[in-house]
Image (cartoon, rainbow, N blue to C red):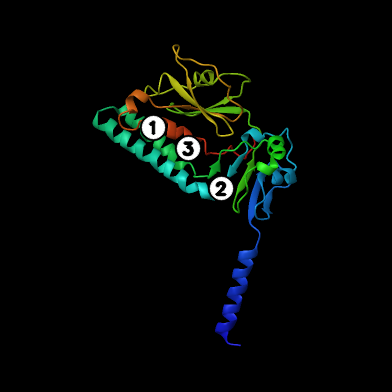
């Protein structure tokens, strides 16, 4: 048999194995058996959650589901945020507003360091997902499910002098955490964004005229202090909202609380 024919046969075997191999996903964190899993085509999330035997008392509220096909959209979101921050920095420098220029630069550097994760916003409550297993979404090869340990802190970031990691206090409202983290003069005085560990985003009033009580931050939540909407409106009206959306794609740390 010729070498060329042997090469063709080997290539065919390789392609066949690739075509018929079951897709694989990765499950990480506080689960009985973390690691890479082989799944059958069309397996639904609820069925997998039942197989994983996840403790219903674990911190599933901070779990995240990542999918490669979502990364392109999130890469565009990140690029848009970075572009708006660069434009805002340049305009502030032209208008002799060094404070706003520095705030935009600081946020630009912070966002540039964050990865594009492909996180899909879906609440991974084991009981709820298993009860509706037949109607839960189907998994895809390359998916990652991450179940982090329960944190004991809240993070305040955005238009602040320095990020603050504050101890979690049950039922404490988001604006109370913000009060313990010095904001920049360029911060919005009227609103903040609350990003819960499951990725849900809320814009909350914090001034005396519009202050509202809402669902308090859960352990691991992010309180995002936005830039003054009135000062960025003309150049980047959606900047703060898109910044919050991108922060919501970041999973909780996998390290110890």
Q: Extreme bottom residue here?
A: 1
When the figure is inspected, residue 79 is found, relative to residue 241, above or below; the finding is below
Could you give the CA–CA distance between mark 3 and mark 1, rounded to whole angstroms?
12 Å
Q: Secondary structure at mark 1?
A: loop
Quadrant of the image containing the N terminus = bottom right
Q: Nearer the viewer, mark 2 or mark 3?
A: 2
Where is residue 82? Give x, y as percent.
Answer: 38, 40
Where is residue 200? Give x, y as percent.
Answer: 55, 31
Q: Say whether disc 3 or disc 1 marks the residue closer to the N-terminus.
A: 1
Residue at which label 2 appears: 67
When the figure is inspected, residue 58 is found, relative to residue 24, above or below; the finding is above
In this orientation, which residue lies closer to the viewer: 128 or 5? 128
Residue at which label 3 appears: 246
Q: Secondary structure at mark 3?
A: helix
Residue at which label 1 appears: 238
Residue at 61% across, 24% down: 168
Q: Which mark is residue 187?
A: none
Number of residues whose C-alpha sits closer than 10 Å to that of mark 2, classed few (under 14), some (14–19) or many (20 or more):
some
Q: Quadrant of residue 186?
A: top left
In this orientation, which residue lies closer to the viewer: 67 or 32? 67
Q: How many numbered discs?
A: 3
Where is residue 91? Give x, y as percent.
Answer: 27, 33
Where is residue 136? Give x, y as percent.
Answer: 65, 42
Q: Is residue 170 left or right of residue 185?
A: right
Q: Secondary structure at mark 2?
A: loop
Q: Is residue 174 visible?
A: yes
Could you give the CA–CA distance between mark 2 and mark 3, rounded to whole angstroms?
15 Å
Q: Quadrant of residue 220?
A: top right
- The reply to whether callout 3 and callout 1 are in contact (CB within 8 Å) is no
Could you give the CA–CA distance between mark 2 and mark 1, rounded to whole angstroms?
25 Å
Q: Say whether disc 2 or disc 1 marks the residue closer to the N-terminus.
A: 2
């Amino acid at each position: 048999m010729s070498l060329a024919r042997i090469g063709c046969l080997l290539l065919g075997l390789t392609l066949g194995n690739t075509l018929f191999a079951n897709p694989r996903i990765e499950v990480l964190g506080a689960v009985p058996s973390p690691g890479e899993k082989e799944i059958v085509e069309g397996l639904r999330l609820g069925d997998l959650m039942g197989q994983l035997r996840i403790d219903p008392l674990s911190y599933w509220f901070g779990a995240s589901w990542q999918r490669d096909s979502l990364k392109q959209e999130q890469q565009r979101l990140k690029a848009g945020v970075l572009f708006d921050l660069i434009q805002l920095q340049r305009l502030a420098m032209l208008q002799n507003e060094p404070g706003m220029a520095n705030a935009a630069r600081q946020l630009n550097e912070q966002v540039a360091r964050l990865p594009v994760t492909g996180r899909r916003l879906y609440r991974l409550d084991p009981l709820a997902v298993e009860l509706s297993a037949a109607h839960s979404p189907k998994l895809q090869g390359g998916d990652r499910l991450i179940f982090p340990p329960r944190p004991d802190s809240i993070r305040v970031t955005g238009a602040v002098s320095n990020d603050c990691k504050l101890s979690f206090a049950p039922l404490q409202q988001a604006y109370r955490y913000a009060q313990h983290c010095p904001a920049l003069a360029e911060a919005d005085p009227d609103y903040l964004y609350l990003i819960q560990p499951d990725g849900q985003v809320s814009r909350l009033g914090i001034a005396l005229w519009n202050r509202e009580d809402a669902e308090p931050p859960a352990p691991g939540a992010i309180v995002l202090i936005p830039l003054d909407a009135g000062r960025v409106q003309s150049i980047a009206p959606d900047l703060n909202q898109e910044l919050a959306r991108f922060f919501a794609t970041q999973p909780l740390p996998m390290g110890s609380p």
